[in-house]
């Protein structure tokens, strides 16, 4: 089924949470491990604009549908960050934008060179780059949907679970766009399939791993994808990716867990 980009842009809205009673977190606070994972998720949602920045210098920005989607996508991800920040604030965890900026500045020249590298890579690869961008985005969004739903299942806090599932529902629409685009573009080009397979196998990492410290990445991956049930979720993400044209057999999420010593 084709993704209706016009319908998506017309119906895009910020995630709602004002109807939820966040004061219950004062009476029934979340455990430290969950707050740590939420803070990670919040920070990464706010960093979406940096990912958008890097993509705007590649061939992707020349595609009308991709540009329209990414504009709405960036807006929705920002509001996901705002919603999670509101939950954290009820636990006296304040998300400070100067701190977020400092996190980015710690990356130094890597952050400054990323747009340059993306531009050069995009021009070298050409139109095949968009296919790689789309399947990479699909992998990240499948991971996001799984992470939000998994945390909702683990915590079983009625208010938190409702918020996380609302966010996951929006992330699922992001999946639909990326996956539709990726499937179509990969299906038309063997070269794009080879490029996508090489990029995912050799360079993909868990969402946020390029920004957050290894300790934080390991905590979130272990919290959400560790153990038998977590591994099942990881396997589901890999199965989605492996169904893409030319990507059969890839297990990038499970490989990332193994590389970080996350127990099954």
Image (tube, rainbow, N blue to C red):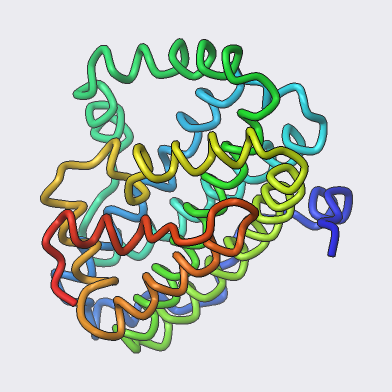
Q: Which of these two is toward me, 21 or 3?
A: 3
Position in image of residue 188 (x %, y %):
77, 42
User: Is residue 17 at least partly visible in the picture?
Assistant: no
Q: In which quarter of the image is residue 12?
A: bottom right
Q: In this view, does 111 lie to the left or right of 117?
A: left
Q: Quadrant of the C terminus?
A: bottom left
* Residue depicted at x 50% and y 23%: 54
Q: Nearer the viewer, residue 258 or 21?
A: 258
Note whether 142 is above or below 56 in the view shown: below
Residue 7 in sight in this render: yes
Outermost front residue: 190
- Whether 10 is drawn above or below 121: the answer is below
Is residue 193 or residue 140 the one in the foreground? 193
- Where residue 36 sits: x, y (%)? 20, 61
Provide residue 39's location: percent of width, then percent of height.
27, 55
Q: Quadrant of residue 185?
A: top right
Residue drawn at (48%, 32%), measured in percent from left and top? 51
Q: In this view, does 91 lie above or below 8?
A: below
Instruction: Classify residue 214 as left or right of residue 60.
Output: left
Nearest the eye: 221 or 240: 240
126 sits left or right of 1 in the view: left
Image quarter of the N terminus? bottom right
Whole-percent x, y for residue 18 in the image? 54, 68
Residue at 19 percent across and 68 percent down: it is 222
Across the whole image, how many numbered discs are drawn on residues?
0
Residue positioned 28% across, 27% down in the render: 104
């Amino acid at each position: 089924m084709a993704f209706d980009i016009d319908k998506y842009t017309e119906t895009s809205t910020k995630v709602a949470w004002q109807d939820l009673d966040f004061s219950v977190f004062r009476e029934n606070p979340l455990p430290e491990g969950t707050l740590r994972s939420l803070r990670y998720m919040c920070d990464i949602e706010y960093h979406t604009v940096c990912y958008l920045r890097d993509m705007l210098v590649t061939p992707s920005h020349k595609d009308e549908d991709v540009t329209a989607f990414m504009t709405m996508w960036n807006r929705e991800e920002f509001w996901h960050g705002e919603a999670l920040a509101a939950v954290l604030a009820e636990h006296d965890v304040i998300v400070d934008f100067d701190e977020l900026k400092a996190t980015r500045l710690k990356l130094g020249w890597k952050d400054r060179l990323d747009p340059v590298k993306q531009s050069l890579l995009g021009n070298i690869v050409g139109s095949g780059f968009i296919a790689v961008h789309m399947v990479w985005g699909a992998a990240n969004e499948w991971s996001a949907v799984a992470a939000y739903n998994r945390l909702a299942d683990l915590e079983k806090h009625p208010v938190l679970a409702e918020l996380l599932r609302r966010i996951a529902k929006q992330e699922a629409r992001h999946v639909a766009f990326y996956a539709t685009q990726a499937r179509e573009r990969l299906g038309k080009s063997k070269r794009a399939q080879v490029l996508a397979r090489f990029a995912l196998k050799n360079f993909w990492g868990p969402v946020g791993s390029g920004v957050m410290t290894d300790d934080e990445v390991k905590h979130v991956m272990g919290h959400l994808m560790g153990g038998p049930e977590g591994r099942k979720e990881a396997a589901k993400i890999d199965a989605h990716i492996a169904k893409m044209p030319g990507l059969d057999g890839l297990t990038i999420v499970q490989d990332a867990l193994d590389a970080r010593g996350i127990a099954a």
